[in-house]
Amino acid sequence: MSSAFLTDAAPRPQAASAAFVAALATAQVGAFLSFMPLLTILAPLKAAALDPANKAWILAQVSFWGALVAGVSNIVAGAVSDATRSRFGRRRPWILAGLVGAVVSYLLIMRADAVPELVAGVLLFQICLNLLFGPLVALLADCVPAARRGRVAAFLGFAPPAGAMAGALVAGLLPPQDAVRYGGIAALLVAATAPLLVLTPERPTGAGLLRLARPPRPEGPRGLRLDRDFAAAWLSRLLMQLAITIVSLFTLFSIQDRTALPRGLAPEALLGLLVGVSCVMQVAASLAGGFLSDHLARRKPFVVGAGLLLAGGAAALAFGTDWRLMAGAFLVFGLGYGLFTAVDAALITDVLPSAEDAGRYLGLSNLANTLPQMVAPLLGAALLEAASGYAWLYLAAAAAATAGGLLVLAVRRVR
């Protein structure tokens, strides 16, 4: 890989074609599908198989180190893709490289028979996934005008529910053989990402296969600027994602430890059904929120509403040991989750301090997704040990969601 001193203005977003939006949404589904079942089903099952008595702390260790690596690698991936000059554009080469690496890492995780091997496999997976995901997220800012980002983000909002539903079906309802579960998710990731590699409207940014460009500025590389609106949106996302991560990580354990299951239904199968209920509501809320936020030219009321819905669902889970009550809680939680994913994605791109450095800032914004993956397992394991129950854990999630929703009111450049 060679470097060159080139300067290129940020691409001016054009009207996004329906084919590109569909391919981008499908690739987002694939990205979420690749990690959501890993965090909510496969990693907890692997932790329980390695040491049933210490499964919560094993999961905490895996999630902490995985999230730490994910946060760093996403920022690096965004910055590197910003600087990439190739005949295939800035983002596409790294999406392909991350795709190949993620598939390989699944094999390592599947074959892990000790905690260090499991941690190593997850670390490799997080590096490769974020090599794919960082440039993928930047395409929204690169290729979609601001006035249309809400509706496009609404389709991208399909990614968390569709990824969770497909992942739950593959990992929770298919035969329990690891080869079937991991192989099915890897195959779906490849199938979901391949169309975007063909349909991305990226223009060539250089003549070679791949090189990095640095701006010829005497003061050195351009630094990131501190921006109040971006900071408020970032912290709002952090708190909301903390609530979402707590619910996602510990619900399987909650079902195993305190839920009376219908006859013949395994805990992971019940979780799959609950995720399915949530996903239906996520899709509806994502579409409605994205289109309405564009039509009304307002983002903040929708994010506030999302936080309150997430809080209500999490609070219901605090006291809901019956599986039917849990289904109702997941319905409310899904409404908040869908509304949040669509509108927050548009809001964060609206307050980027620099369009030219979209990859870097979106990589930084992704820390608000990965830091909760570090904090939530440790917080959850500590609360479970101190309080000997799940109520305080879910109430902490409700408090975080409420605070995150209200904090977005501090953003000034977006209504």
Image: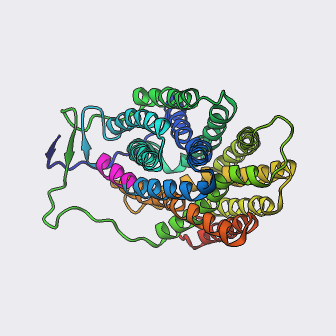
How far across and down, in percent of the image, does residue 391 sit?
A: 76, 66
How far across and down, in percent of the image, does residue 152 sit?
A: 56, 42
Front-lying residue, 166 or 88: 166
How far across and down, in percent of the image, does residue 138 sit?
A: 42, 47
Residue 79 magenta? yes
The image's colour scheme reads rainbow
- Find residue 281 and report its image quarter: top right
The answer to whether one can see residue 95 in this image is yes
Q: Main secondary structure of the magenta part?
A: helix
181 relative to 270 in the view: left or right: left
- Find residue 321 and report its image quarter: bottom right
Residue 383 magenta? no
How far across and down, in percent of the image, does residue 308 sit?
A: 73, 64
The answer to whether one can see residue 297 in this image is no
Residue in view at x 31 percent, y 49 percent? 82
Front-lying residue, 314 or 138: 314
* Screen quadrant of the N terminus: top left
Front-lying residue, 228 or 120: 120
Residue in view at x 64 percent, y 30 percent? 176
Residue in view at x 39 percent, y 44 percent? 124
Query: What stretch of residues is rendered in magenta?
Result: 73-82
Residue in view at x 43 percent, y 28 percent? 199
The number of numbered discs placed on residues in the rendered structure image is: 0
- Find residue 407 and report its image quarter: bottom right
* Screen quadrant of the C terminus: bottom right
Q: Is residue 120 above or below residue 409?
A: above
304 relative to 74 in the view: left or right: right
